Amino acid sequence: MELLHLVATPRTNGSNTLRISKVFIEGLRKKYPELKITTLDLFQTEIPAMAGDKIETKYLIMQGGNLKENFTATWTEIESFIGGFMRADMYLISAPMWNFTIPFVLKYYIDTIVQPSYLFKYLEDGTPVGLCDGKMVVIKTSGSDYSNPPLSYLDFHEPYLRGIFGFCGITDIHFISAYNMDITPEIREQSITSAIHDQVPGILAQL
């Protein structure tokens, strides 16, 4: 079994999100001793931009056309990231909430890999069908608590990730959330401890 760990936090040391992810990974290793983990630090990875020739290639593929020879090299970059994603059996995303949504590097990565004929396809009537499967866990931290009204409407983080990966066929998605990271050190530690001891074991039991 292969786990792809997408790290979308710029702080490798001192990251509240990664503190929780570390405990989760330790538990997953105990459950699956043969687990292979591939870590992709999105802040340290040069992700190809969906621009120029790549955009034209994307629409050629969507319309069923043949890939132009001079576009092959640029599209190979995209395919390498898609291949790395599709090889995994399970996914872990470590992503704090930034401005009510996901960090920009994670959105950049998603825009690179979510391509027609790879992660999804269209049926003849135009209905999209996801081509992915597997299970996904998202470790999410946020400065305040957006889990309940009146602030819950500001949470675009979880709905977006459920939406985009559900569109691609991954519907078994679990969230481990730690709120109030920016209130006081005591409240922050209490929230992280709660995520580790109350949420992580339950999610591991479902995987």
Image: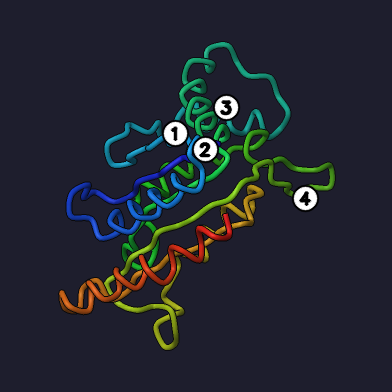
User: On residue 143, which mark appears?
Assistant: none
> Looking at the image, is mark 2 or mark 1 earlier in the sequence?
1
- Residue extending farthest to the bottom is 150
> Looking at the image, is mark 3 or mark 4 earlier in the sequence?
3
Disc 1 residue type (three-letter): Ala
Q: Residue 131 sits in which quadrant? A: top right
Identify the residue shown where x is 70% and y is 24%: 65
Instruction: Tell me the element at label 3.
Output: helix
Q: Nearer the viewer, residue 135 or 203?
A: 203
Identify the residue shown where x is 52% and y is 36%: 2
User: On residue 113, which mark appears?
Assistant: 2
Q: CA distance from mark 3 to mark 4?
A: 21 Å
Q: Residue 99 sits in which quadrant? A: bottom left
> Looking at the image, is mark 2 or mark 4 earlier in the sequence?
2
Count neighbours of disc 4 (C-alpha within 10 A) and say few if under 14, some if 14 to 19, many if 20 or more.
Answer: few
Judging by the rendered image, the residue that carries numbered circle 3 is: 57
Judging by the rendered image, the residue that carries numbered circle 4 is: 127
Q: Does 24 appear above or below 48?
A: below
Labels 3, 2: front one: 2
Horizontal and vertical percent position of residue 59: 62, 33
Residue 41 shown left or right of residue 130 in the figure: left
Disc 4 residue type (three-letter): Thr
Disc 3 residue type (three-letter): Thr
